[in-house]
Amino acid sequence: MVVASHAALPRLSLGEIEDQRLDGTIKGVPPGASLRLGDVGRQGWNVLAGDMPMPLAVIRESVLKANSAWMATFTAANDLLIAPHGKTTMAPQLFDLQIADGAWAITVATTQQLAVCRRFGVKRVILANQPVGKQEIAACFDALREPGFELYCLADSVAGLGLLAEAASAHRGATPLRILVEIGFMGGRTGARSQAEALAVARAIAASPGLRLSGFECFEGLLSEPKAADRLLDEVVATAAAADAEGLLGPELMVLSAGGTSLFDRAGERFNAASFARPILKLLRSGCYLTHDSTTYTASFRRITMETSLALPPGGLEPALEVWAYVQSRPERGRSLLTVGKRDISYDSGLPVPLRWYRPGGSMARPEPMPAGHTVLALNDQHCHLGTPEASPLQVGDMVAFGIGHPCTTFDKWAHLMLVDDDYRVTGAVRTFF
Protein backbone atom coordinates (compact mmCIF):
# COMPACT_ATOMS: atom_id res chain seq x y z
CA MET A 1 0.00 0.00 0.00
CA VAL A 2 1.39 3.42 -1.03
CA VAL A 3 0.18 6.21 1.22
CA ALA A 4 0.60 9.94 0.65
CA SER A 5 2.81 11.22 3.41
CA HIS A 6 2.71 14.15 5.78
CA ALA A 7 6.45 13.64 6.32
CA ALA A 8 8.55 16.76 6.28
CA LEU A 9 10.80 17.23 3.29
CA PRO A 10 14.56 17.12 3.88
CA ARG A 11 16.56 20.30 3.42
CA LEU A 12 18.19 20.75 0.04
CA SER A 13 21.80 20.27 -1.03
CA LEU A 14 22.96 23.74 -2.08
CA GLY A 15 26.75 23.36 -2.10
CA GLU A 16 26.86 23.30 -5.90
CA ILE A 17 25.14 26.69 -6.01
CA GLU A 18 27.37 28.17 -3.32
CA ASP A 19 30.45 27.10 -5.32
CA GLN A 20 29.39 28.70 -8.61
CA ARG A 21 31.67 31.46 -9.84
CA LEU A 22 30.38 34.98 -10.43
CA ASP A 23 32.11 37.66 -12.45
CA GLY A 24 31.41 40.92 -14.24
CA THR A 25 29.76 39.18 -17.21
CA ILE A 26 26.76 38.52 -14.97
CA LYS A 27 24.13 41.23 -14.66
CA GLY A 28 24.31 42.88 -11.24
CA VAL A 29 27.89 41.80 -10.43
CA PRO A 30 30.53 44.56 -10.18
CA PRO A 31 33.01 44.80 -13.08
CA GLY A 32 36.26 42.99 -12.32
CA ALA A 33 34.73 40.81 -9.60
CA SER A 34 35.49 37.09 -9.57
CA LEU A 35 34.24 35.09 -6.62
CA ARG A 36 32.14 32.19 -5.35
CA LEU A 37 28.45 32.88 -4.99
CA GLY A 38 28.72 31.75 -1.38
CA ASP A 39 31.22 34.55 -0.71
CA VAL A 40 29.07 37.42 -2.01
CA GLY A 41 27.87 38.37 1.46
CA ARG A 42 31.46 38.75 2.71
CA GLN A 43 32.46 41.51 0.25
CA GLY A 44 31.03 44.44 2.22
CA TRP A 45 29.07 45.65 -0.81
CA ASN A 46 26.30 48.18 -0.25
CA VAL A 47 23.76 49.13 -2.90
CA LEU A 48 23.49 52.72 -1.66
CA ALA A 49 27.25 53.20 -1.80
CA GLY A 50 27.21 52.50 -5.51
CA ASP A 51 29.10 49.23 -5.09
CA MET A 52 26.76 47.40 -7.48
CA PRO A 53 26.06 48.20 -11.14
CA MET A 54 22.48 49.05 -11.99
CA PRO A 55 19.89 47.96 -12.88
CA LEU A 56 20.00 45.67 -9.87
CA ALA A 57 17.36 43.27 -8.57
CA VAL A 58 17.44 42.89 -4.80
CA ILE A 59 15.47 40.87 -2.28
CA ARG A 60 15.10 42.37 1.16
CA GLU A 61 16.04 39.39 3.28
CA SER A 62 14.11 40.31 6.43
CA VAL A 63 10.88 40.75 4.45
CA LEU A 64 11.46 37.53 2.51
CA LYS A 65 11.84 35.50 5.69
CA ALA A 66 8.87 37.20 7.34
CA ASN A 67 6.64 36.41 4.34
CA SER A 68 7.69 32.76 4.38
CA ALA A 69 7.08 32.49 8.12
CA TRP A 70 3.71 34.26 7.82
CA MET A 71 2.44 31.78 5.25
CA ALA A 72 3.67 28.85 7.34
CA THR A 73 1.78 30.19 10.34
CA PHE A 74 -1.32 30.92 8.26
CA THR A 75 -1.53 27.44 6.74
CA ALA A 76 -0.93 25.72 10.09
CA ALA A 77 -3.60 27.83 11.80
CA ASN A 78 -6.17 26.92 9.15
CA ASP A 79 -5.50 23.18 8.73
CA LEU A 80 -3.93 23.73 5.30
CA LEU A 81 -0.67 22.73 3.67
CA ILE A 82 1.32 24.51 0.97
CA ALA A 83 3.25 23.28 -2.05
CA PRO A 84 4.54 26.64 -3.29
CA HIS A 85 4.89 27.08 -7.01
CA GLY A 86 8.58 26.94 -7.79
CA LYS A 87 8.14 28.56 -11.21
CA THR A 88 7.78 31.91 -9.42
CA THR A 89 11.45 32.04 -8.43
CA MET A 90 13.13 28.92 -9.85
CA ALA A 91 15.63 29.40 -7.04
CA PRO A 92 16.50 26.27 -5.03
CA GLN A 93 17.88 28.47 -2.24
CA LEU A 94 14.38 29.92 -1.85
CA PHE A 95 12.78 26.46 -2.17
CA ASP A 96 14.96 25.49 0.79
CA LEU A 97 13.62 28.40 2.84
CA GLN A 98 10.05 27.32 2.03
CA ILE A 99 10.85 23.71 2.92
CA ALA A 100 12.39 24.86 6.21
CA ASP A 101 9.09 26.62 6.89
CA GLY A 102 7.10 23.44 6.29
CA ALA A 103 6.31 23.27 2.56
CA TRP A 104 4.75 19.87 1.84
CA ALA A 105 6.06 19.82 -1.75
CA ILE A 106 7.39 22.13 -4.44
CA THR A 107 5.16 22.72 -7.45
CA VAL A 108 6.55 23.09 -10.97
CA ALA A 109 5.14 23.67 -14.44
CA THR A 110 7.60 21.87 -16.73
CA THR A 111 9.88 18.86 -16.69
CA GLN A 112 12.91 21.18 -16.85
CA GLN A 113 11.72 22.67 -13.57
CA LEU A 114 11.18 19.13 -12.26
CA ALA A 115 14.81 18.36 -13.16
CA VAL A 116 15.98 21.40 -11.16
CA CYS A 117 14.06 20.19 -8.12
CA ARG A 118 15.51 16.70 -8.38
CA ARG A 119 19.04 18.01 -8.87
CA PHE A 120 19.01 19.81 -5.54
CA GLY A 121 17.12 17.20 -3.53
CA VAL A 122 13.40 18.06 -3.50
CA LYS A 123 11.71 14.76 -2.67
CA ARG A 124 8.05 15.60 -3.37
CA VAL A 125 7.01 17.51 -6.48
CA ILE A 126 3.71 18.47 -8.09
CA LEU A 127 3.95 18.92 -11.85
CA ALA A 128 0.98 21.26 -12.24
CA ASN A 129 0.46 20.38 -15.88
CA GLN A 130 -0.37 17.26 -17.83
CA PRO A 131 2.74 15.89 -19.59
CA VAL A 132 1.91 14.95 -23.18
CA GLY A 133 5.18 14.70 -25.18
CA LYS A 134 7.36 11.60 -25.30
CA GLN A 135 10.26 13.30 -23.53
CA GLU A 136 8.06 14.89 -20.87
CA ILE A 137 6.30 11.64 -20.02
CA ALA A 138 9.59 9.73 -19.92
CA ALA A 139 10.99 12.33 -17.51
CA CYS A 140 8.13 11.68 -15.10
CA PHE A 141 8.62 7.92 -15.00
CA ASP A 142 12.38 8.31 -14.79
CA ALA A 143 11.90 10.49 -11.71
CA LEU A 144 9.90 7.73 -10.05
CA ARG A 145 12.93 5.46 -10.12
CA GLU A 146 14.58 7.71 -7.55
CA PRO A 147 14.20 6.12 -4.10
CA GLY A 148 11.85 8.03 -1.84
CA PHE A 149 10.71 10.43 -4.55
CA GLU A 150 7.00 11.29 -4.93
CA LEU A 151 5.58 12.88 -8.08
CA TYR A 152 2.10 14.20 -8.77
CA CYS A 153 0.93 15.47 -12.14
CA LEU A 154 -2.36 16.60 -13.66
CA ALA A 155 -4.78 15.13 -16.18
CA ASP A 156 -7.89 16.74 -17.66
CA SER A 157 -8.94 14.41 -20.50
CA VAL A 158 -9.22 10.71 -21.24
CA ALA A 159 -7.12 11.26 -24.37
CA GLY A 160 -4.30 12.87 -22.40
CA LEU A 161 -4.57 10.29 -19.66
CA GLY A 162 -4.20 7.57 -22.28
CA LEU A 163 -0.67 8.79 -23.07
CA LEU A 164 0.29 8.43 -19.41
CA ALA A 165 -1.41 5.05 -19.10
CA GLU A 166 0.50 3.72 -22.11
CA ALA A 167 3.80 4.78 -20.59
CA ALA A 168 2.79 3.43 -17.17
CA SER A 169 2.15 0.00 -18.63
CA ALA A 170 5.84 -0.21 -19.49
CA HIS A 171 6.97 1.24 -16.16
CA ARG A 172 8.30 -1.40 -13.81
CA GLY A 173 8.89 0.84 -10.81
CA ALA A 174 7.08 0.23 -7.53
CA THR A 175 6.13 3.88 -7.12
CA PRO A 176 3.00 4.94 -9.02
CA LEU A 177 2.58 8.22 -10.83
CA ARG A 178 0.03 10.05 -8.76
CA ILE A 179 -2.57 11.99 -10.74
CA LEU A 180 -4.72 14.95 -9.75
CA VAL A 181 -7.73 15.48 -11.99
CA GLU A 182 -7.80 19.09 -13.11
CA ILE A 183 -11.09 21.02 -13.07
CA GLY A 184 -11.25 24.06 -15.33
CA PHE A 185 -13.72 26.72 -16.45
CA MET A 186 -14.92 28.08 -19.76
CA GLY A 187 -12.39 30.49 -21.24
CA GLY A 188 -9.74 29.42 -18.74
CA ARG A 189 -6.65 27.32 -19.13
CA THR A 190 -6.50 23.53 -19.02
CA GLY A 191 -8.96 21.54 -16.93
CA ALA A 192 -12.07 19.44 -17.53
CA ARG A 193 -15.02 21.67 -18.34
CA SER A 194 -17.68 19.45 -16.76
CA GLN A 195 -18.00 17.07 -13.86
CA ALA A 196 -18.85 14.27 -16.29
CA GLU A 197 -15.56 14.80 -18.12
CA ALA A 198 -13.62 14.94 -14.88
CA LEU A 199 -15.18 11.75 -13.57
CA ALA A 200 -14.40 9.98 -16.83
CA VAL A 201 -10.75 10.91 -16.33
CA ALA A 202 -10.88 9.75 -12.71
CA ARG A 203 -12.31 6.37 -13.76
CA ALA A 204 -9.62 5.97 -16.41
CA ILE A 205 -6.90 6.67 -13.84
CA ALA A 206 -8.37 4.18 -11.38
CA ALA A 207 -8.38 1.51 -14.10
CA SER A 208 -4.76 2.13 -15.20
CA PRO A 209 -1.94 0.08 -13.61
CA GLY A 210 1.00 2.26 -12.61
CA LEU A 211 -1.20 5.33 -12.12
CA ARG A 212 -2.94 6.36 -8.92
CA LEU A 213 -5.89 8.72 -8.56
CA SER A 214 -4.75 11.01 -5.76
CA GLY A 215 -7.19 13.90 -5.81
CA PHE A 216 -8.66 16.88 -7.60
CA GLU A 217 -7.42 20.39 -8.21
CA CYS A 218 -7.91 23.66 -10.07
CA PHE A 219 -6.17 26.92 -10.83
CA GLU A 220 -8.45 29.75 -9.78
CA GLY A 221 -5.88 32.52 -10.18
CA LEU A 222 -7.24 33.76 -13.53
CA LEU A 223 -10.63 34.50 -12.04
CA SER A 224 -11.14 38.10 -10.99
CA GLU A 225 -14.03 37.66 -8.55
CA PRO A 226 -14.07 35.67 -5.30
CA LYS A 227 -17.56 34.35 -6.07
CA ALA A 228 -16.35 32.91 -9.38
CA ALA A 229 -13.45 31.26 -7.55
CA ASP A 230 -15.89 29.82 -5.02
CA ARG A 231 -17.93 28.22 -7.80
CA LEU A 232 -14.84 26.59 -9.29
CA LEU A 233 -13.57 25.41 -5.91
CA ASP A 234 -16.98 23.98 -5.07
CA GLU A 235 -16.89 22.08 -8.36
CA VAL A 236 -13.57 20.56 -7.28
CA VAL A 237 -15.14 19.45 -4.00
CA ALA A 238 -18.30 18.09 -5.66
CA THR A 239 -16.29 16.09 -8.20
CA ALA A 240 -14.08 14.69 -5.46
CA ALA A 241 -17.15 13.66 -3.49
CA ALA A 242 -18.64 11.90 -6.52
CA ALA A 243 -15.39 10.04 -7.20
CA ASP A 244 -15.11 9.05 -3.55
CA ALA A 245 -18.68 7.72 -3.60
CA GLU A 246 -17.75 5.53 -6.59
CA GLY A 247 -14.79 4.10 -4.70
CA LEU A 248 -12.30 5.34 -7.29
CA LEU A 249 -9.64 6.42 -4.79
CA GLY A 250 -7.19 4.20 -3.00
CA PRO A 251 -6.32 4.19 0.70
CA GLU A 252 -4.09 7.25 0.74
CA LEU A 253 -5.16 10.76 1.67
CA MET A 254 -7.19 12.51 -1.02
CA VAL A 255 -5.69 15.80 -2.17
CA LEU A 256 -7.81 18.88 -2.78
CA SER A 257 -5.66 21.64 -4.21
CA ALA A 258 -5.81 25.11 -5.75
CA GLY A 259 -3.03 27.17 -7.17
CA GLY A 260 -3.34 30.95 -7.11
CA THR A 261 -1.88 33.62 -4.83
CA SER A 262 -4.57 36.26 -5.22
CA LEU A 263 -7.45 34.04 -3.98
CA PHE A 264 -5.79 31.60 -1.62
CA ASP A 265 -8.26 32.53 1.10
CA ARG A 266 -11.15 31.29 -1.03
CA ALA A 267 -9.43 27.92 -1.50
CA GLY A 268 -8.89 27.61 2.24
CA GLU A 269 -12.47 28.50 3.10
CA ARG A 270 -14.13 26.25 0.50
CA PHE A 271 -11.91 23.25 1.21
CA ASN A 272 -12.35 23.66 4.97
CA ALA A 273 -16.12 23.65 4.46
CA ALA A 274 -16.00 20.30 2.64
CA SER A 275 -16.99 17.15 4.52
CA PHE A 276 -15.60 13.73 3.63
CA ALA A 277 -15.61 10.41 5.46
CA ARG A 278 -11.99 9.91 4.41
CA PRO A 279 -9.05 12.08 5.46
CA ILE A 280 -8.21 14.81 2.98
CA LEU A 281 -5.13 16.92 2.38
CA LYS A 282 -6.01 20.56 1.66
CA LEU A 283 -3.19 21.99 -0.37
CA LEU A 284 -2.45 25.52 -1.59
CA ARG A 285 0.06 26.00 -4.41
CA SER A 286 0.54 29.77 -4.14
CA GLY A 287 4.03 30.94 -5.11
CA CYS A 288 4.12 34.73 -5.32
CA TYR A 289 3.49 35.22 -1.59
CA LEU A 290 7.21 34.70 -0.92
CA THR A 291 8.32 38.05 -2.30
CA HIS A 292 4.81 39.47 -2.80
CA ASP A 293 4.60 42.58 -5.01
CA SER A 294 3.76 46.27 -4.97
CA THR A 295 0.69 46.17 -7.22
CA THR A 296 -1.70 43.29 -7.95
CA TYR A 297 -0.95 41.00 -5.04
CA THR A 298 -0.84 43.90 -2.60
CA ALA A 299 -4.43 44.73 -3.63
CA SER A 300 -5.45 41.07 -3.42
CA PHE A 301 -3.98 40.69 0.05
CA ARG A 302 -5.79 43.82 1.20
CA ARG A 303 -9.06 42.19 0.10
CA ILE A 304 -8.14 38.98 1.92
CA THR A 305 -7.54 40.82 5.19
CA MET A 306 -10.92 42.53 4.92
CA GLU A 307 -13.04 39.57 3.80
CA THR A 308 -11.70 36.23 4.93
CA SER A 309 -13.07 34.19 7.81
CA LEU A 310 -9.78 32.31 8.10
CA ALA A 311 -7.38 32.98 10.95
CA LEU A 312 -4.75 35.53 9.94
CA PRO A 313 -1.46 35.70 11.87
CA PRO A 314 -0.12 39.05 13.06
CA GLY A 315 1.61 41.13 10.44
CA GLY A 316 1.11 40.27 6.80
CA LEU A 317 2.73 39.91 3.43
CA GLU A 318 4.99 42.74 2.27
CA PRO A 319 6.93 43.43 -0.96
CA ALA A 320 10.44 42.01 -0.71
CA LEU A 321 11.59 42.31 -4.34
CA GLU A 322 12.84 45.62 -5.74
CA VAL A 323 14.73 46.68 -8.86
CA TRP A 324 17.06 49.66 -8.52
CA ALA A 325 18.17 52.01 -11.29
CA TYR A 326 19.95 55.31 -11.83
CA VAL A 327 18.40 58.49 -13.16
CA GLN A 328 20.32 58.67 -16.43
CA SER A 329 18.85 61.72 -18.12
CA ARG A 330 16.24 64.45 -17.72
CA PRO A 331 16.07 65.45 -21.37
CA GLU A 332 12.70 67.18 -21.40
CA ARG A 333 10.14 68.71 -19.14
CA GLY A 334 8.05 66.13 -17.28
CA ARG A 335 10.14 63.11 -18.22
CA SER A 336 13.21 61.37 -16.80
CA LEU A 337 15.01 58.36 -18.24
CA LEU A 338 16.27 55.65 -15.89
CA THR A 339 18.57 52.67 -16.43
CA VAL A 340 15.98 49.87 -16.18
CA GLY A 341 13.76 48.35 -18.84
CA LYS A 342 11.79 45.39 -20.08
CA ARG A 343 14.81 43.13 -19.83
CA ASP A 344 15.07 43.79 -16.09
CA ILE A 345 11.60 44.18 -14.59
CA SER A 346 8.09 42.78 -15.03
CA TYR A 347 5.51 44.73 -17.01
CA ASP A 348 2.92 42.08 -17.95
CA SER A 349 0.52 42.89 -15.11
CA GLY A 350 1.12 46.61 -14.76
CA LEU A 351 4.10 48.91 -14.97
CA PRO A 352 6.58 49.19 -12.09
CA VAL A 353 5.98 51.61 -9.23
CA PRO A 354 8.71 54.04 -8.06
CA LEU A 355 8.97 53.50 -4.31
CA ARG A 356 12.06 55.30 -2.99
CA TRP A 357 14.92 57.50 -4.12
CA TYR A 358 18.42 58.10 -2.84
CA ARG A 359 21.26 60.50 -3.70
CA PRO A 360 24.68 58.83 -3.32
CA GLY A 361 27.32 60.87 -1.53
CA GLY A 362 24.82 63.42 -0.30
CA SER A 363 23.22 64.20 3.03
CA MET A 364 20.50 61.53 2.89
CA ALA A 365 20.86 58.99 5.68
CA ARG A 366 18.71 56.44 3.89
CA PRO A 367 16.31 56.22 0.93
CA GLU A 368 13.25 58.42 1.14
CA PRO A 369 9.73 57.72 -0.17
CA MET A 370 9.23 58.84 -3.75
CA PRO A 371 7.22 62.07 -3.78
CA ALA A 372 3.76 61.93 -5.32
CA GLY A 373 3.42 62.48 -9.03
CA HIS A 374 6.23 60.23 -10.25
CA THR A 375 4.74 57.56 -12.53
CA VAL A 376 6.23 55.11 -15.00
CA LEU A 377 5.00 56.10 -18.45
CA ALA A 378 6.65 53.38 -20.54
CA LEU A 379 9.47 50.85 -20.67
CA ASN A 380 11.90 50.18 -23.50
CA ASP A 381 14.33 47.28 -23.53
CA GLN A 382 16.87 49.11 -21.33
CA HIS A 383 15.15 52.38 -20.34
CA CYS A 384 12.33 53.51 -18.09
CA HIS A 385 10.36 56.64 -18.94
CA LEU A 386 9.42 58.18 -15.61
CA GLY A 387 6.82 60.94 -15.53
CA THR A 388 8.44 63.61 -13.39
CA PRO A 389 6.60 66.57 -11.83
CA GLU A 390 8.02 70.10 -11.87
CA ALA A 391 8.91 69.96 -8.18
CA SER A 392 10.71 66.61 -8.44
CA PRO A 393 13.96 66.40 -6.45
CA LEU A 394 15.46 63.85 -8.86
CA GLN A 395 18.80 64.62 -10.47
CA VAL A 396 21.01 62.71 -12.88
CA GLY A 397 22.90 60.12 -10.83
CA ASP A 398 20.19 59.61 -8.21
CA MET A 399 19.03 56.05 -7.42
CA VAL A 400 15.42 54.92 -7.60
CA ALA A 401 13.92 51.72 -6.20
CA PHE A 402 11.00 50.27 -8.15
CA GLY A 403 8.35 47.99 -6.77
CA ILE A 404 7.26 45.27 -9.15
CA GLY A 405 4.10 43.46 -10.14
CA HIS A 406 3.97 39.71 -10.83
CA PRO A 407 7.23 38.45 -9.31
CA CYS A 408 7.48 35.54 -11.79
CA THR A 409 8.35 37.84 -14.67
CA THR A 410 10.97 39.79 -12.76
CA PHE A 411 12.73 36.68 -11.43
CA ASP A 412 13.02 35.19 -14.92
CA LYS A 413 15.02 38.20 -16.08
CA TRP A 414 17.83 37.59 -13.58
CA ALA A 415 20.29 34.72 -13.27
CA HIS A 416 21.27 36.11 -9.87
CA LEU A 417 19.50 38.43 -7.44
CA MET A 418 21.19 40.06 -4.47
CA LEU A 419 19.96 39.58 -0.92
CA VAL A 420 20.18 42.76 1.14
CA ASP A 421 19.57 43.73 4.75
CA ASP A 422 17.43 46.66 5.83
CA ASP A 423 20.32 49.07 5.16
CA TYR A 424 20.88 47.64 1.66
CA ARG A 425 24.10 45.90 2.61
CA VAL A 426 24.50 42.84 0.39
CA THR A 427 24.20 39.67 2.47
CA GLY A 428 24.24 37.04 -0.27
CA ALA A 429 23.07 36.08 -3.74
CA VAL A 430 20.28 33.88 -5.06
CA ARG A 431 20.72 31.82 -8.24
CA THR A 432 17.78 31.16 -10.55
CA PHE A 433 17.38 28.32 -13.09
CA PHE A 434 15.13 29.55 -15.90
Image: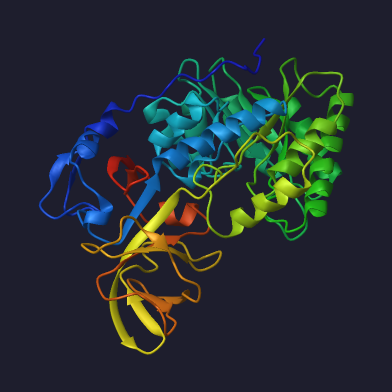
279 relative position to 336: left or right: right
Q: Give coordinates of residue 258: x percent, y percent.
A: 69, 40
Residue 375 appears in the rendering: yes
In the rendered image, the residue lying farthest to the left is 32
* Residue 243 falls in image quadrant: top right
Residue 434 appears in the rendering: no
With respect to residue 194, does 348 lie above or below? Answer: below
With respect to residue 420, does 4 lie above or below? Answer: above
78 relative position to 432: left or right: right
* Residue 199 falls in image quadrant: top right
Q: How many labels sit on residues?
A: 0
- Residue at 81% in and 24% down: 248
In the rendered image, the residue lying farthest to the top is 1
Nearer to the camera, 64 or 348: 64
In the rendered image, the residue lying farthest to the bottom is 333
Q: Is the N terminus in the top left, top right, bottom left or bottom right quadrant?
A: top right
With respect to residue 55, does 416 lie above or below? Answer: above
Nearer to the camera, 368 or 73: 368
* Residue 225 falls in image quadrant: bottom right
Q: Give coordinates of residue 132: x percent, y percent.
A: 57, 44
With respect to residue 91, does 103 lie above or below? Answer: above
- Residue at 49% in and 53% down: 407
Q: Give coordinates of residue 59: x percent, y percent.
A: 39, 47
Q: Give coordinates of residue 181: x percent, y percent.
A: 72, 37
55 relative position to 8: left or right: left
15 relative position to 65: left or right: left
